[in-house]
Amino acid sequence: TAPCESVPIVWVQAKVSGMVERALAGGAEALTGGAVSERFGTGYHFEPTVLTGVSQADEIVQREVFGPVLPVLTFSHFDEGIALANDCEYGLTSSI
């Protein structure tokens, strides 16, 4: 199968792009993606994005992005990872 290169979404301009731009402005690094895809020419497509250099308090970690964006945090031990995953309002953004 071909790798996923973009995902069509309707909130691209206001929500996903804004959240990623704010994360990048705050010091995050996009290992891949990070922008609206121009590949298809029409529609709303956002590149699958992996962000590092984010903190637990960052919007991109605390809020549901509803787009193909994965912020990555590190932790030292399992219990810390669980605490970080549980430290958000709705629990929609958490994974280990």
Image (tube, rainbow, N blue to C red):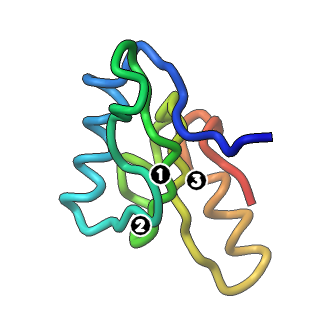
Is disc 1 placed on a helix, strand or loop? Answer: helix
- Image-quadrant location for residue 63: top left
Residue 34 position, x and y percent, is: 37, 49
Q: Label 2's element? A: loop
Count residues near mark 1 (Cα–Cα under 10 Å), then give few for <14, some for 14-19, many for 20+: many
User: Which comes sooner in the sequence, label 3 or label 1?
Assistant: 1
SS class of the residue under badge 3? loop
Query: Badge 3: few (under 14), some or many (20 or more) residues near its Cα, within 10 Å?
Result: some
Label 2 amino acid? Ser
What label does residue 55 carry, if any?
2
As measured in the structure, the alpha-carbon distance from the residue carrying label 2 to the one carrying label 3 is 12 Å
For the C terminus, the image quarter is bottom right
Report which residue position mark 3 lands on.
Answer: 87
Q: Give the residue drawn at x 30%, y 35%.
A: 17
Q: Mark 2 or mark 3, which has the lower sequence index?
A: 2
Position of 75 with respect to 1 (left or right) is: left
* Vertical comparison of 45 with 33: above or below: above
Query: Quadrant of the image for the N terminus?
Result: top right
**Label 1 amino acid?**
Val
Residue drawn at x 68%, y 74% as measured from the top left: 80
Structural distance between the alpha carbons of marks 2 and 1: 7 Å
Asked whether the beta carbons under mark 2 and mark 1 sit within 8 Å of each other, the answer is yes
Left or right, residue 61 beside residue 43: right
Q: Which residue is mark 1?
A: 61
Up the image or down, 21 lies above or below 8; here it is below
Tell whether 1 sits left or right of 13. right
**Measured Cα–Cα span from mark 3 to mark 1:** 10 Å
Q: Nearer the viewer, mark 2 or mark 3?
A: 2
Instruction: Give coordinates of residue 18: x percent, y percent.
Output: 25, 36
